[in-house]
Image (spheres, rainbow, N blue to C red):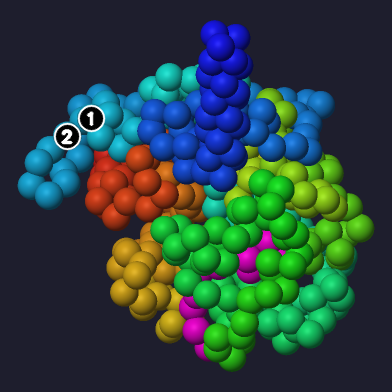
Amino acid sequence: MARTARWMAGGTAVAAAGAGMAWLWRHQEEVAFRRPMNEWTFTHMSTVLPVAAVPAAARVRPLSRGELPPGFTYEFRGTRRTLEQLHERTHTTGFAVLHRGRLVHESHPGRFGGPARRFQLFSLTKSVTSILLGIALTEGALGSLDDKVVTYCPELAGSAYDGPTVADLLDMTSGAGGVEDYEDPQAPVNRLMRAVTGRGSVLDVVRSVDTGADPGTFFNYSTLDSQVLGWVLEGATGLPLARYASERLWSRIGAETDAYYGLSRSRPRTAVGGGSFNATVRDMARVGLLMARGGSFDGEQVVPKEWVERGRGSGKELLRPGALGEQYPAHYGYANQWWTLGGEHRAFTGLGIYGQFLWVDPVADVVVVKTSAWPTAEDPDRDAETVAALSSLVTHLSTAE
């Protein structure tokens, strides 16, 4: 009887453990992306997903050093705060500031941060994909922005992406897919992420979405658009995304640390061109410097100046700051896989959920990289405070001589 009881107890424990593992598998993203676990997750994505490396440059181009002028504070909703308070309030994990090409500030407040730590950049990846497409266009691999997507992705024939052009996707006006709602399990972006983690086909998810508007007529932020742009780039160049990024971008800006793309667990493996690039803040500062200098880096024109200008604002009324729709902060517009900020400087920023920023102000010659681990994917208050702080930081650098 005692032996039977022990066997039953052991069986119950095994069953409970199995049920627990099954629950953890079904809810892995939810658990991994909660604070404080997400600070670890966002710096260890190579242990979570298969990856494709983007090797560091054979010749590293050092960043010259400078000093952040003392006394910086910013005001947000009637209260003045310091940079350290910004980091604490917005869960900064890595932070770098370039002014006039010099690294004037770098810090790594995150528990797992450091100069060589690669951070998950989420949708800031979209802006990197845009840069690569600009290079491919210049090289002639990509024929025209007016080319239909299916020219490069014939597997999407008959889907909602059979009709939109490359330009439509760059401006998030494909007309395909639904609302990017991270709280809705059935939203296209969440179905995409489930497929990436091995529960379904990424291609099937992309092919499954409906047409919601005529191409070019309506702004709808969609990671699926950017996923397709990654496939367009691969189809046009004949190279995997990571290899093209290494040969055409990472090597030419003198990146000092390997970066990597997360790949889908499901096969065929595919790079997540809309949200899986991982890199150090210092190397992303080099990317920002490239954009701040009109696509030129150390005298080499890496990406056309016209392409950089396209990312600062297209002039289209439906994409200007404040015109994107009620669900988007009024301080943002959109163009070419970048969020535009308008104003005299026409600054622009790459953004990623959970608080990732690549802020570029070409007029002030300022670049700011901020990686974060917010408690939730989207946080309007933390976004607004970060925008207030970075805007004030640009002013501080421009006026403090």
Residue matched to label 2? 81
Residue nearest the observer in this picture, 80 or 380: 380
The answer to whether residue 195 is magenta is no
Residue nearest the observer in this picture, 172 or 359: 172
Q: Amino acid at mark 2?
A: Arg
x 86%, y 65%: residue:
236
- The secondary element bearing badge 1 is classed as helix
Q: Residue at the front extreme? A: 1
Image quadrant holding the C terminus, namely top left
The answer to whether residue 224 is magenta is yes
Could you tell me if the residues under marks 2 and 1 are in contact, i.e. CB atoms within 8 Å? yes
Q: Is any atom of residue 119 visible in this view?
A: no
Residue matched to label 1? 85
Whether residue 393 sits left or right of residue 123 in the image: it is: left
Q: Position of residue 15 (x, y in %)?
A: 58, 30
Whether residue 204 sits left or right of residue 30 in the image: it is: right
Sort mark 2 into few (<14), some (14-19) or many (20+) by Cα contacts within 10 Å: some
x 81%, y 26%: residue:
58
Q: Which residues are magenta?
A: 217-229
